[in-house]
Amino acid sequence: MSSNFNKVLNILKKFTKNELVSLFNIALDSVNYNEPVEKSDCPYCSSNRVILYGKKRGKQRFLCNDCKHTFTTTTHTIRSMSHQPYDVWEGMIEDTLNGNSLSYSEDRLGISHQVAFNMRHKILLSLQDIERENPFKLQDVTELDETFVLECYKGQRLPSHITRKPRKHGAKALKRGSSNEFICICSGAQRKSNVILKAVNRAKPSSVEVTQVFKGHIADGTLLLTDGLRSYNVLESVADCSIKNITGEKTGFYNLNTVNSLHSFVKDQYKLYRGVATKYINRYCTLFEYAFRSGASDINNLKVALLNQRGHMPYSISNVKSHELTAIA
């Protein structure tokens, strides 16, 4: 086996760069990607007048008879501009939705750290697209509260205005209690149903920020349970709902157990990931929303939706690094 490998290696050394590229493309065309091929509407003009148009690097190519664009099954999806096959994407989506770390996915799927990172953030961007296209409202009995997580500059140098030394994994804040080292995540949890998470600032949310987070997400007739923060009172002008301050009660029916359970889930995931870079925190908040309520069947359905979701923008590496980052002063 080793002698045959050495022979092939010696032959390949004689090829020019262009010849090697051509040989690589031929090899890709012969690969079985093991992915379902179905005709889909044109991602450029939404026409259904498409025909089969050969293959491109092992993927079925189509031609739109209206706008004359050619496209493949992965155009404008999370798999666009990716060399990873269908089954690797399936595995990465499962690991992401199940809360597994990047290191775990690297070892299980046999990919590099940078590839795992790019794939995960393409998935997170696609989740945000799905949530925007399928908005939901909290209704019935909904609990509102906020939680705080440490700011994190993971993967980058500390900004010039940060005077502290970089933290090691598991380190605590320099100051006791609440301080400007923490990021506030505003949260709402409908009992046995949807949840909302969004990072807003470094302090308790103001009325303006509460409105930004929950406007359009509160159904009429909803009973909102809070811990007494006055900022939440603005929601009575945003939707036809009622607000009850349960400070001092928190027993029986009137409690914040669901939203507190959500906060525990978020902090457990934070520990597992060894922190989440603050600029990406709202991407992960969307993930936590889905993961908190999803069972096995929900994850399978969401996996199919993610693999077939066509985004409003190309899921490129540049978008992974810069699109809709969370800016908190």
Image: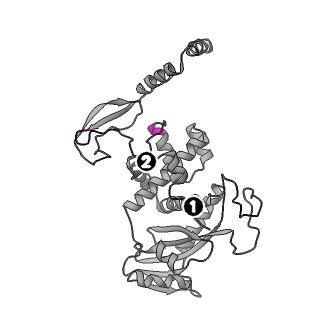
Q: Earlier in the sequence, mark 2 or mark 1?
A: 1
Q: Residue at x 47, y 20 (%)?
A: 23
Q: Name which residue type carries label 1.
A: Ile
Is residue 29 toward the left or the right of residue 175 in the image? left
Is residue 193 toward the left or the right of residue 167 in the image? left
Depth check, front residue: 256 or 78 = 78
Q: Is residue 296 above or below residue 60?
A: below
**CA–CA distance between discs 2 and 1?**
21 Å
Which of the labelled discs sits on residue 314, or is there none? 2
Can I make out residue 94 in this image?
A: no
Q: Residue at x 51, y 81 (%)?
A: 207
- Residue 95, position in %: x, y? 53, 48
Most distant residue in the front direction:
160
Which residues, given as a range, are shown in magenta?
64-87
Is residue 50 toward the left or the right of residue 211 in the image? left
Q: Name which residue type carries label 2.
A: Pro
Is residue 199 toward the left or the right of residue 128 in the image? right
Q: Which residue is mark 1?
A: 281
Q: Is residue 297 above or below residue 2?
A: below
For the stretch drawn in magenta, the main secondary structure is loop
Depth check, front residue: 180 or 29 = 180
Depth check, front residue: 188 or 178 = 178
- Residue 279, position in %: x, y? 59, 59
Q: Is residue 109 above or below residue 121?
A: above
- Residue 81, position in %: x, y? 46, 40
In the rendered view, how is the structure colored? one colour
Disc 1: CA contacts within 10 A as few (<14), some (14-19) or many (>=20):
many
